[in-house]
Amino acid sequence: MTRATDRAFAAGVAALAMLVPLTLVAIAVLIVIEAWPSITTFGLSYLTTTVWDPVKLVFGVAAYVYGTLVTTAVAVILAAPVAIGCAIYLTEFAPRPLRGPVAYVIELLAYIPSIIYGLWAIFVMVPVMRGVVEPALQGTLGRLPVVGRLFSGTPVGLDLLSGGVVLAIMILPILLAVSREVLLAVPPTQREAMIGLGATRWEAVSRAVLPYARPGIIGGAVLGVARAFGETMAVTMVVGNSSREIGGSLFTPGYTMASAIANQFLEADGELYFSAIVEVALVLLLVALVVNAVARVLIRRSIADRPAGAVV
């Protein structure tokens, strides 16, 4: 009787475990079926062109992919140092009575609906970006060779840079929470060994704690990237949604793949137009899968490169 119960339990949990990959496969198959007319009509040109003309029924998603990658990169570049620095402070340097409340308040940001972020960005962040931040960036970094191209053009506030900034605020709680838990999981012997050898607190953190925690921190960054890829409403409200050009400037109003779907899904009155919109979702899914696969490779390499003296 016990063996039969064990087999039934094992079969049940195996079936539950298979629900996740089967659900992903079912979603992918449905998206491919709906996007098939667009796939067969445009082929690879759909990924390489920026023309999106519902009147002439010509569609290319390159500009949407570009906008998604740019806003996500800006978000991670801005949020990762802040999150990691805050996590180090909370786990290594902050007074114990302060650690819990500060971490709790920051993590509360994860529960705020994205539409609230969008409204705040429209009424508060965008005017500041347009009147203060973007002119300052243009007047300083904009004068540098090569880098200055990122800050060329007219500061309008509703652009790729603003989309990246609001995404950075939204992924900050995830990065902080994961980084904090990873740092807390580092064995005390890592710190004690360095301090026992005469190292300062910062030397112990930088040479023993952070190398040990690096794979987990990279994993947290991956979660932040996944959140940034799929975010829709807040980005749609501040990214501009008015240009499909790939110009190299962060001050260009643009689209992300998620905002393009949100803006045009209900307008797709023809079969080919609707199929092209669904193929945007397919590309978004494929890009997310590729990024996560690359991230897993980086995590494995980070684990392989972990210092030999680390306590595992």
Image (cartoon, rainbow, N blue to C red):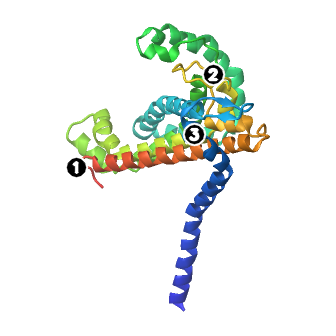
Residue 67, percent from left and from top: 57, 30
> Looking at the rendered structure, which numbered label has been put on residue 308?
1
Residue, far bottom: 1
Picture quadrant where residue 11 is located: bottom right
Answer yes or no: is residue 207 visible: yes
Label 3: element kind: helix
Q: CA distance from mark 2 to mark 3?
A: 18 Å
Left or right: 189 with respect to 59? left
**Residue occupying image coordinates x 60% and y 28%:** 163
> Looking at the rendered structure, which numbered label has been put on residue 229?
3
Which residue is at the front of the view, 57 or 256? 57
Q: Residues within 10 Å of mark 3 (few under 14, many from 20)?
A: many
Q: Is residue 203 above or below residue 10?
A: above
Q: Is residue 288 above or below residue 128?
A: below
Residue ID for mark 2: 253
Q: Is residue 241 above or below residue 304?
A: above
Mark 1 vs 3, N-terminal side: 3
Label 1–label 2 contact, CB within 8 A? no
Residue 51, percent from left and from top: 63, 29
**Of discs 1 and 2, which sits in the foreground?**
2
Label 1: element kind: loop
Query: Tag 2: residue type?
Result: Pro
Mark 1 vs 2, N-terminal side: 2
Query: Tag 1: residue type?
Result: Ala
Answer yes or no: is residue 232 visible: no
